[in-house]
Image: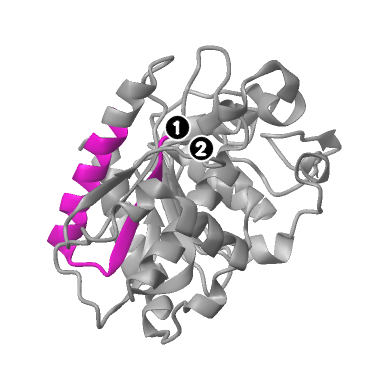
Amino acid sequence: MNMKRTAAIVLAILLSVSFAAAETGTDWLTADDISRETMTAYAEYSALQRLNAKMMAGTLYHVAAEDDTLIDWMFALPNNFDSGKTYDIVVTALHGDSINNYDQQIRCTQGQMYDALRALNQNGGSYILLSPVIPRPGDIYPVGFDRRIFFSRDRYEEIYLDPDRQLLGAYALLQAWLVDHNVKVRAGLFIEGFSAGGMFAQRFTVLHPDVVRGCAAGQMGGLVTMPVEKVDGATLTWPEGISDYEEMMGYPFDLEAYQAIPQLLYIGSGDMKSNCFRAMIFGCGSMCMMGILSQSQRVMIFPAYRRFF
């Protein structure tokens, strides 16, 4: 089976089983929950305002970059959209295709979003899809949170920096748009991806555990970013670990928040590729369907990583 489609199936299982408790919630965002700064940015975002009269179920919206939002982004509502339901936001269609060709990157994202929307319409889930179009120049890898976007910032254009904050900006604007259209949507987001998309999903979860409600990530370039600073006396710098997390983010890592997130991390048993030698040491290619993060979480993890989660 195509691994990207496997990722979609895994996400559906994860959302329906591991996150079942989320479906029992009754709280949703109101205008009072949206910051004044976000509402001002939303009101001035012409690409979003042009969508105000076009809200339709089953529609894929492409929102062009504007002002502080440096990248394009997309979102979609399911065919069975019902204003009486409460929805969750799922970040999907993350990929590392199309080097030095942003127009092609946009088309790739559109194609994957249409695939995700078809899958959503088939399973009837109460989710709204969101995807940032992350650019990929030839010498840096923003979708994988390349450490150079944190430590060599003066060498690159602003559009290639802070892909996490670009997603957070799009997420906040989407919340404002949905609230403005009386859509009941819960705070927090789910995120999934495979390969480059898995790298983004898992590393975004490490960077922003306060925002993520659940993560499903596959292959991840052969390297899981571990939520620890050292292993057996070896210091793990980003993206192997978080020894320099506070230097990158400006605040300490919240391990408790991270451990509270249901996660599904998976890889094929024959996948021996790795972006890092240490990843092979810690078990790349020996994935098995076992391991528990806590009593409330379901997860399949690299066996050698279990002690770090």
Q: Is residue 181 left or right of residue 157?
A: left
> For the stretch drawn in magenta, what is the main secondary structure?
helix
Residue at 15%, 59% in the rendered image: 121
Taking 284 as reference, is 8 left or right?
Answer: left
Is mark 2 in CB contact (under 8 Å) with mark 1?
yes
| Residue 120 visible to an observer of this rendering | yes
Which quarter of the picture shows residue 63? top left
Look at the picture and state if 242 lies above or below 239: below
Q: Which residue is mark 1?
A: 196
Q: Which residue is mark 2?
A: 199
Q: Quadrant of residue 223?
A: top right
Q: Where is residue 220 shown, x and y percent of the image?
A: 48, 36
Q: Note whether 298 is above or below 83 in the view shown.
A: above
Helix, strand or loop at mark 2: helix
In the rendered image, residue 98 lying in the magenta stretch gets the answer: no
Quadrant of the rendering where the N terminus is positioned: top left
Q: Split into 4 quadrants, where in the image is the C terminus?
A: bottom right
Nearer to us in this view, 289 or 105: 105
Q: Amino acid at mark 1?
A: Ala
Q: Which residue occupies 83% across, 35% down?
A: 235
Which residues are drawn in magenta?
108-133
- Secondary structure of residue under mark 1: helix
